[in-house]
């Protein structure tokens, strides 16, 4: 539980830890194999625990980093499959007092990993 100041009153705000958030957000994702869903939860939790860090730092060790890369490049998993649960949870958590919700549509990107270099392509 975290408290935030609101004027002169304290307002209690519930905050999930990274693992709880990842389980709640991605725990029910359908990716064809339950192990993929487990991996998504693990990767999301690691990323949420240290969002400003590089992916190698977030994953902690080489084998976990390689597993994350395999997840990201798996052609059986789409961007939408991974983002849909997050978007749904974001909409669910939207404050009731919010009168408008603005969504930003992102452009799809493609990445190519070669050795230790990555090439990112953005469509125009």
Image (tube, rainbow, N blue to C red):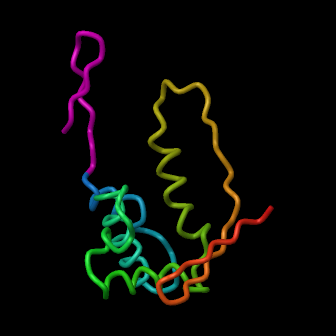
Relative to 120, residue 67 above or below: below
Q: Residue at x 25, y 53 (%)?
A: 17
Relative to 21, residue 69 above or below: below
Q: Nearer the viewer, residue 88 or 75?
A: 75
Q: Dividing the image into 4 quarters, which one contains the N terminus?
A: top left
Q: Residue at x 46, y 32 (%)?
A: 95
Q: Residue at x 39, y 85 (%)?
A: 67
Q: Nearer the viewer, residue 99 or 56?
A: 56
Q: Quadrant of residue 64?
A: bottom left
The image shows residue 56 at horizontal and vertical percentages of 35, 74
Provide the major secondary structure of the magenta segment. Answer: strand
Q: Quadrant of residue 11?
A: top left
Residue sitting at the far right:
124
The image shows residue 7 at horizontal and vertical percentages of 29, 11
Q: Nearer the viewer, residue 113 or 67?
A: 113
The answer to whether residue 75 is magenta is no
Q: Is residue 44 shown left or right of residue 102?
A: left
Q: Residue at x 39, y 86 (%)?
A: 66
The image shows residue 46 at horizontal and vertical percentages of 31, 66
Relative to 88, residue 116 above or below: below
The answer to whether residue 14 is magenta is yes
Residue sitting at the far top:
8
Q: Count the labels in the image.
A: 0
Q: Nearer the viewer, residue 50 or 4?
A: 50
Relative to 17, residue 34 above or below: below
**Magenta segment:** 1-16
Q: Dividing the image into 4 quarters, which one contains the C terminus?
A: bottom right
């Amino acid at each position: 539980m975290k408290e935030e100041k609101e004027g002169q009153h304290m307002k209690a705000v519930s905050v999930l830890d990274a693992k709880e958030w990842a389980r709640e957000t991605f725990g029910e994702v359908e990716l064809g194999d339950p192990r993929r869903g487990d991996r998504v939860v693990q990767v999301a939790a690691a990323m949420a625990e240290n969002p400003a860090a590089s992916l190698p730092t977030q994953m902690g060790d080489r084998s976990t980093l390689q597993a994350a890369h395999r997840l990201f490049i798996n052609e059986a998993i789409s961007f939408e499959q991974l983002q849909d649960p997050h978007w749904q949870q974001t909409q669910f958590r939207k404050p009731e007092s919010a009168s408008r919700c603005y969504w930003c549509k992102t452009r799809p990107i493609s990445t190519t990993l070669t050795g230790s270099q990555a090439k990112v392509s953005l469509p125009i």
